[in-house]
Amino acid sequence: VAFLLHSPFLALYSLVWIPIFVAISLAEERDLVLRYGKAYEEYRERTGFFLPKRE
């Protein structure tokens, strides 16, 4: 979107926040595995990380 809008600010913002968002999501995944164990691992296999899996 940043490139379509020719927005250097939005591009920089994305470059900063996307890795932070991924790191937070990975930490949350580890926490969910610790809390819910096998049930969450089975759920994770059926779903995608950020986008739904296609069947």
Image: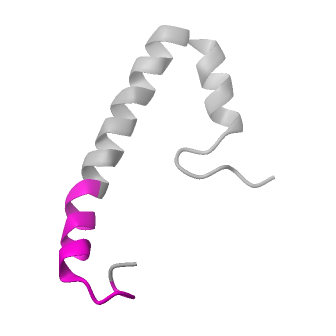
Of 26 and 8, nearer the camera is 8
Name the image colouring. one colour
Q: Is residue 9 magenta?
A: yes
Image point (18%, 75%), residue name: 9
Identify whether 18 is placed above or below 23.
below
Image point (65%, 15%), residue name: 39
- Horizontally, residue 12 falls left or right of residue 31, namely left
Residue 3, quarter of the rendered image = bottom left
Of 33 and 50, nearer the camera is 50
Q: Is residue 45 magenta?
A: no
Image point (39%, 88%), residue name: 4
- Horizontally, residue 52 falls left or right of residue 49, namely right
Magenta highlight range: 3-17
Identify whether 47 is placed above or below 8.
above
Whole-percent x, y for residue 34 in the image: 45, 12
Of 5 and 20, nearer the camera is 5
Quadrant of image for the N terminus: bottom left
Whole-percent x, y for residue 27 in the image: 34, 30
Image point (55%, 11%), residue name: 36
Identify whether 28 is placed above or below 54.
above
Query: Which residue extends farthest right?
Result: 55
What kind of secondary structure does the magenta stretch mostly adopt? helix
- Horizontally, residue 19 falls left or right of residue 25, namely left
Counting the numbered discs, the total is: 0
